[in-house]
Amino acid sequence: MAGASVVARADGAARPMRSAEKRVIFASSLGTVFEWYDFYLYGSLAAIIGAQFFSAYPPATRDIFALLTFASGFIVRPFGALVFGRIGDRVGRKFTFLVTILIMGLSTFLVGVLPNAATIGIAAPVILIVLRLAQGLALGGEYGGAATYVAEHAPNGRRGFYTSWIQTTATLGLFLSLLVILATRTFAGEAAFAEWGWRIPFLVSVLLLGVSVWIRLQLSESPAFQKMKDEGKTSKAPLTEAFGRWTNAKVAVIALFGLVAGQGVVWYTGQFYALFFLQSILKVDGYTANLLIAWSLLLGTGFFVVFGWLSDRIGRKVIILTGCAVAAATFFPIFKGITAAANPKLAAAIETVTVTVTADPAACGTLFNPVGTRVFTAPCDSARDFLSKSSVRYATVAGAAGQSATVRVNGTEIPYPPGGAAEANRATTAALQAAGYPEAGDPGIVKMANPFDVFRSQVARVIGLLFLLVLFVTMVYGPIAAMLVELFPTRIRYTAMSLPYHIGNGWFGGLLPATAFAMVAQTGDIYFGLWYPVVIAVATVIIGVLFVPETRDRDIFTDA
């Protein structure tokens, strides 16, 4: 195996990829396809899962529990990175690879066979949560393992290109989940799908699991780890060595704040917040919004590989930080352009209609509503929540102490008395539409009749702008795996790279949609939530420029 590492270094960047290396990349990528397949699957079916497993509770509470169960898988990912990273650095990459994908795949499959609450009562949601936690832990070790394994098989000078193929799997997971859900809905019908058909997409995952495990069993240990193991240089305490020693812990902190935090928010803004923005703020129907995002991903996916390849030539750091900087500089104009193209009447109303909420400041609270089920009772909060959900740009004006809340739309004033929100909302809607705000389902809102309805100018403009967001995603995400691998020595690489990756993406990125919309609701500006990714991306650029080293020329076969 030591000879294999010499060959991997010696034949350099010029030779074509070998069949064995293609098999390594394919086997590694299947696990991350699982990750994204399940992510989109559970997110798309959260309402049905809530009805199946939390049926003893009111609908709003079901939604909360279903979404919290979904979130639990993200929360535990950093802990999974520690657990499986330690195993990967002590026992080996291949063994850990097999364990994580088995846990992850079986957890997804078992959701499909789990009896619902009507059948086994409280045990159903408890088991569902356990499965989500197990899956989240396994996922915490999966990405770091995939990136490490591929990078340690790649020759020097080609790690960016080799690992960039892993980054394309998010798109494949999205398309796979959409295809399976749409096919099952069509075959079973909506009623049957809600009753039992939703299980089929989870059950289908066992096919991916079987293929992936079979392929991974054929693989050998990575050359870098095997060489280190043969020389007796493996770490006895990877966690202590990675995070208990400041020389290594400092690198992890720099990687988090100087690379991954910015990458995470740019990624989530370009895909998940863009989808949320289309549906919840611009009122584009779900079918069209998903197709628009799918087309932008389809057009942009190849650039993950392009920027991975380019990072082997000009450097990882410059591409990632440039992606963060360009994204931060252009998020506001791009999202304003999306509004103008997707819902032109709304864009015009935002610029021309003046809306204010006047109330006693002491009677106005926070509108943070991460799962969208909080009920506001104070008149000031009810009015602002209604305007935010109606995508209305408004300002809050401080009234006199004890003053009841009122909404003013241009010259029309609508009182919001205690307990009278429903009637006041209807009056506000009428005033907004009279002033120029679009009605729900306005014919000017972008709409796709079928997946191939992409040549109309309105649809093409929206896809073009979404493509720019995806392009930024590919810039920051394409080279990140190679760079994280190269930042850390072989003996602690699996452990050390996994933690900043999952904190940056799972926490900084995962919190973005809820935090951004809370900022929108609190300020009355549909674009204000973009300050969250902009500030973090700018901070990443500054920290990255000052503290992150370039790594593309490092020889990871000699750094054990």
Image (cartoon, rainbow, N blue to C red):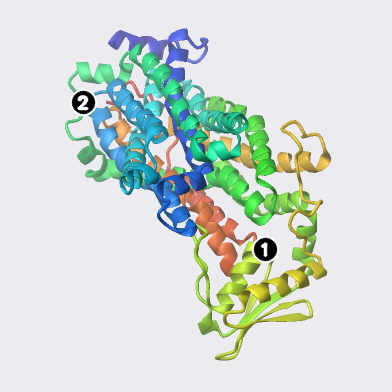
Residue type (three-letter) at the residue carrying disc 2: Thr
Distance, label 1 to label 2, CA atoms, is 58 Å
Quadrant location, the N terminus: top left
Report which residue position mark 1 lands on.
390
Give the mark nearer the N terminus: 1 vs 2: 2
> Residue visible at 33% across and 24% down?
97
| SS of the residue under disc 1 | loop
Identify the residue shown where x is 56% and y is 31%.
Answer: 171
Amino acid type of the residue that numbered disc 1 sits on in the rendered structure: Ser
Determine the image quadrant of residue 382: bottom right
- The reply, left or right, for residue 492 in relation to residue 45 is left
- Picture coordinates of residue 298 (x, y %)? 64, 30
The disc at residue 234 is: 2
Are dots 1 and 2 in contact, CB under 8 Å? no
Q: Residue reaching furthest front?
A: 119
Q: Residues within 10 Å of mark 2 (few under 14, many from 20)?
A: many
Q: Nearer the viewer, residue 429 or 271?
A: 429
Q: Is residue 62 visible?
A: yes
